[in-house]
Image (cartoon, rainbow, N blue to C red):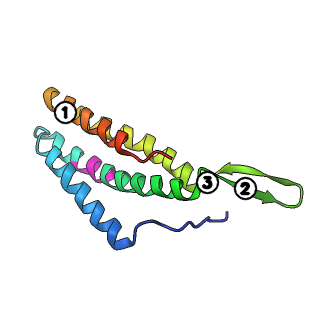
Amino acid sequence: MVLVDFEHIYTPEQRAEKLAEKKKEFAQLLTKIPGKKKKAGRAISEQAAFLAVAIEELDKIVIRDGYVEEYQNGESQKGTKKTVAADLLDRYTKTYTTTIKQIVDLLPEEEAKTAKDEMTEFMKRRPKG
């Protein structure tokens, strides 16, 4: 298996800073989760924070590098395929949506609506290619 490397947008320091910001945002949401559900919410929110930052960076990489790339296997087999960044973006977005739903399901009903609205806003703010 060949690992494809692409030039990242964020430095490790920038990524860590953005991750800390997202964790802080999710920590505020966790204060609204009742009792025993908080521990599960904390673990899920860690994953959601990572995914939010990764999606933000992958969006920018796909805008910069494109959604498809050319490939050639040997002399006769060639064509185009989805880039690694585009594939990761698709998978991470699906996982993020599921992860946020899990967090929302832990919230009291009135807080769940607000959280759903915030997730919708996050998805709307994503760059358009």
Under circle 3, the secondary element is loop
Residue at image location 52% in from the left, 51% down from the top: 88
Q: How many angstroms separate mark 3 from mark 2 (CA)? A: 9 Å
Is 107 or 58 nearer to us in this picture?
58
Which mark is first along the chain, 2 or 3? 2
- x, y percent for residue 129: 51, 47
**Few, some or many residues within 10 Å of mark 2 (<14, 14–19, 20+):** few
Q: Circle 2 sits on which residue?
A: 70
Residue at image location 48% in from the left, 66% down from the top: 8
Under circle 2, the secondary element is strand
Q: Where 22 falls versus 105 (above or below)?
A: below
Asked whether, in this view, residue 60 is left or right of residue 15, the answer is: right
Asked whether, in this view, residue 55 is left or right of residue 40, the answer is: right
Residue at image location 74% in from the left, 57% down from the top: 71
Q: Where 47 falls versus 20 (above or below)?
A: above
Assess whether mark 2 and mark 1 are in contact (beta carbons under 8 angstroms): no
Q: Circle 1 sits on which residue?
A: 114
Which mark is first along the chain, 3 or 1? 3
Q: Circle 3 sits on which residue?
A: 83
**Which stretch is magenta?**
42-47
Under circle 1, the secondary element is helix
Give the residue type at disc 2: Glu
- x, y percent for residue 21: 23, 59
Give the residue type at disc 3: Thr
Residue at image location 42% in from the left, 43% down from the top: 95
Which mark is first along the chain, 2 or 1? 2
